[in-house]
Structures are given as structure tokens and as C-alpha cells.
Amino acid sequence: MISGAKIVRKELSDLDFTEREIHEIAHLVEVHDLIEREKTPNEQMIFEADCLGMIDRERTGRGSLSLDGVAKFMANFETRRMQRLKSKLARTQAKSLFEKAKKIISKYKSDRRT
């Protein structure tokens, strides 16, 4: 998310943030999707929050993905992201949200057939 980090740097420089804060926030935006990378505590926190937001299908619905795209996302999320959640809260929430997401996706598929 290098382009996101550039946008963050520009936007935050117009606000009341220190250079150190801007650098840290931009860095977190830049690395939050680097899944296999070892993470600092702040990087892990942002990664986990991002994961929970991504899998919350009650809030996001199917999004702009096709049903095939959603199936690929779910498989990728389960095999790559869920395995890297460290906090107990994130693991518990992700498991619950993942099960709800499977039900929502199943409903989309059955609605599509009718």
C-alpha cells in the first residue's frame, strides 16, 4: 500500500501530527497487507484490525467481488490471514465472523440460484 502511505503523509502533514507520528502511521498503512512479514506490535495490531474489518460480511456484504471472488477471498483469508492472528480477541472474533461470513455467502449463492 505504498500509494496509501503517500496519501496519508500528504493528508496528515496538513493536520496537527508530528513528523514521527506521520512516519509511523504511513509506515503502518504501507505494511499492513504484507502477510508473511514478521510484525512489530503496532503492525500486528493494524493487521488484526484490518483482518476483522475484511471478514465482517454483515457490515460489508459481498462488496464488489463476484461470488467466485468472494470464494477465493474466503479461502485466502482462512489459510493465510487467520493463521497469523496472535491476540486471543482477534482469533475469537475472526472465527466467529468467518462462520457468519460463510452463512452470508451461502445465502448469496442460494439467492442467485432462485
Image: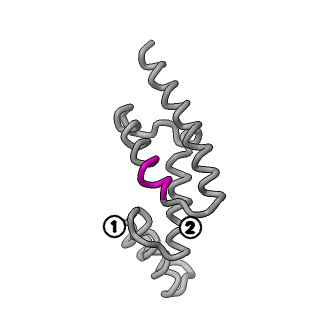
Q: Quadrant of the N terminus?
A: bottom left
Comparing 32 with 41, the one in front is: 41
Comparing 27 with 3, the one in front is: 27
Q: Quadrant of the C terminus?
A: top left
Instruction: Give amino acid for label 2.
Output: Met
Element marked by disc 2: helix
Q: Is residue 101 above or below residue 112?
A: below
Residue 49 painted magenta: no
How would you rate the neighbour count of disc 1 (Cα within 10 Å): few for under 14, some for 14-19, many for 20 or more? few
Q: Position of residue 94 (x, y in %)?
A: 58, 49
Q: Which colour scheme appears in the figure?
A: one colour
How would you rate the neighbour count of disc 2 (Cα within 10 Å): few for under 14, some for 14-19, many for 20 or more? some
Q: Residue furthest bottom?
A: 19
Circle count: 2
Q: Position of residue 111 (x, y in %)?
A: 48, 19
Residue 71 lies in quadrant: top left
Question: Residue 45, which numbered label?
Answer: 2
Q: Position of residue 60 (x, y in %)?
A: 52, 42
Query: Left or right of 18: which side holds 63?
Result: left
Q: Is residue 40 above or below residue 75?
A: below
- Residue 25 visible, this angle: yes
Mark toward the start of the polypeptide (2 vs 1): 1
Q: Position of residue 72 (x, y in %)?
A: 36, 40
- Residue 11 visible, this angle: no
Magenta stretch, residue numbers: 77-83
The residue where tag 1 is placed is 3
Instruction: Name which residue lies at 40% across and 39% down.
Output: 64
Question: Residue 20, which numbered label?
Answer: none
Secondary structure mainly formed by the magenta segment:
helix
Marks 2/1: CA–CA distance: 21 Å
Instruction: Give amino acid for label 1.
Output: Ser
Element marked by disc 1: helix
